Amino acid sequence: MTFPSAPRLAGDALPPLRGRAGVAHWMANVGLFCLPALILTVPQNLLPYGVLLLLSTLLAPDLLWRARGLGGRPVAILALLTLAAIGMGLVSMVLFEQGLRDLDNRSRFIVMAWIALWVCGLRPDIRWLWGGALAGLLGTLVLSILQVSGGAPRAELSTNAIVLADIVLMLMVLLVFCRPHGRWSWVIVGMLAGCVTIVLSGSRGVWLALLALLVVMAMSLRWRTGRARLGVLLALIAISGTLTLTIPSLREQVRLTELQRDVVRLERGDSDSSAGARVERMQVAYDTFLDHPLTGVGIGHFDSAMQRLPVCRDDPAEQRCHLGHAHNDLAEWSATQGVPGLLLLIAVYGVPLWLFAWLHRRSGETTFRGPAAAGIMLVMAYVLCGITQSMFAHQITASFYATIVGLLTGLSVLQGHAHRQAQAQAQPAV
């Protein structure tokens, strides 16, 4: 896919990117590849992409400045969302006399508008992002196999098993919806690699989002009838479910037996388990929200709310009292920031979701694919994964969300601009 030059102001085309600008464009392409390819396969995760982002911006800042007209409303909306997220974090810091370290993950939002404008100015090719997602899935699978075969109970690489599975799913979203034409064989390979990696991670919280991805993927394909789509989808689910339930080693790896034991323990009132701890933290978050509806207990301080439990007061070393977050987006933001935090969480997911839907309508795509479609699915995947994980309590997931929302917004703006230019050129002269 190629993109036309961004307009200087109201429609004057920029000259082709050559010289210093051409080098910045090349670096932007490499950055698009490095983001998904290296986020899980190297310990530095987003650092290589960040270096390329900074260097290419410093190399051609005039391109970003001239692209502000093309970025327009989408970039402005992301800038306002950034100000709201960071501003509320600063308010919490002042109210609870916290240090700047507590705002670390929230500060990641600052790159959203910057990256969207960076894409509009340097015009990287979306195929590099797709290729990076495929490379990232394959590389992560190899490293996960090596880790588990080396004796680790679950694949987690340089992060933890839950975050690993969540990011793998996001790479699968990019692989499916940013695909070039005629690349379905590689999409299938990447999807299989992602599914195997998720199984090796032993994470169960990603299943609902994975199911949603499979449903949307099946429904968006150009099958002859809707019945054919449904049949293929049900067949995939049936095969996956049968394999998982009938192969003992696979059933153990995805922790189905453990989940069954957790449910039995919960029925007996024992919450000292993986599932029980999540339910317990949800109850603590609800009670904390009722006690502090306007301010919460402060960003990053959910563990202080856990002190309302007798077991946490009596035994300060109890592990489940020091997990650092609520393992649920809604619980985390409501308990730590009250009603303002709840509204901000709705905006953090809702605003990009609305923006991507608006950009998709203007993209010229006749099917559900392209950067805007990928953005919609990525936000929905974050929402679904956020049911069992605090997605913004970890550096990787928080940084990836802010980064990829900015990238996909910029790519969607470019695609929409290319579509409108093509329409204008196709109209007969009067």
Image (spheres, rainbow, N blue to C red):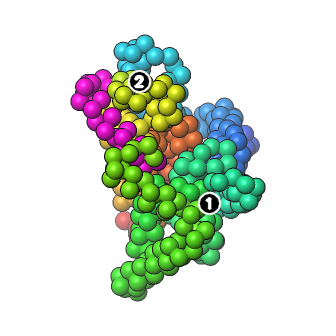
Q: Which mark is residue 315?
A: none
Which secondary structure is most common in the magenta stretch?
helix
Quarter that holds the N terminus: bottom right
The residue sitting at 47% across, 26% down in the picture is 315
Give the residue at the far front of this rendering: 268
Quarter-of-image position of residue 128: bottom right
Residue 6 lies left or right of residue 158; in this view the side is left
Report x, y in % for residue 277.
Answer: 42, 43
Q: CA distance from mark 1 to mark 2?
A: 36 Å
For marks 1 and 2 on the same chain, the one whose residue lies earlier in the sequence: 1
The amino acid pointed to by label 1 is: Leu
Say if 81 sits above or below 299 in the image: below
The residue sitting at 74% across, 59% down in the picture is 149
Say if 142 sits above or below 342 in the image: below
Report x, y in % for residue 254.
Answer: 54, 61
Residue 216 lies left or right of residue 162; in this view the side is left
Say which of 9 and 157 sits in front: 157
Q: Residues within 10 Å of mark 1 (few under 14, many from 20)?
A: many
Q: Secondary structure at mark 1?
A: helix
Residue 305 lies left or right of residue 247; in this view the side is left
Tell me if I can see residue 3 in this picture: no
Say which of 17 and 127 sits in front: 127
Quarter that holds the C terminus: bottom left
Q: Secondary structure at mark 2?
A: helix
The amino acid pointed to by label 2 is: Arg
Q: Which mark is residue 313?
A: 2
Say if 276 sits above or below 422 in the image: above
* Mark 1, residue position: 200
Magenta residues (range):
274-296
Q: Residues within 10 Å of mark 2 (few under 14, many from 20)?
A: few
Report x, y in % for residue 400.
Answer: 54, 44
Q: Is residue 291 magenta?
A: yes
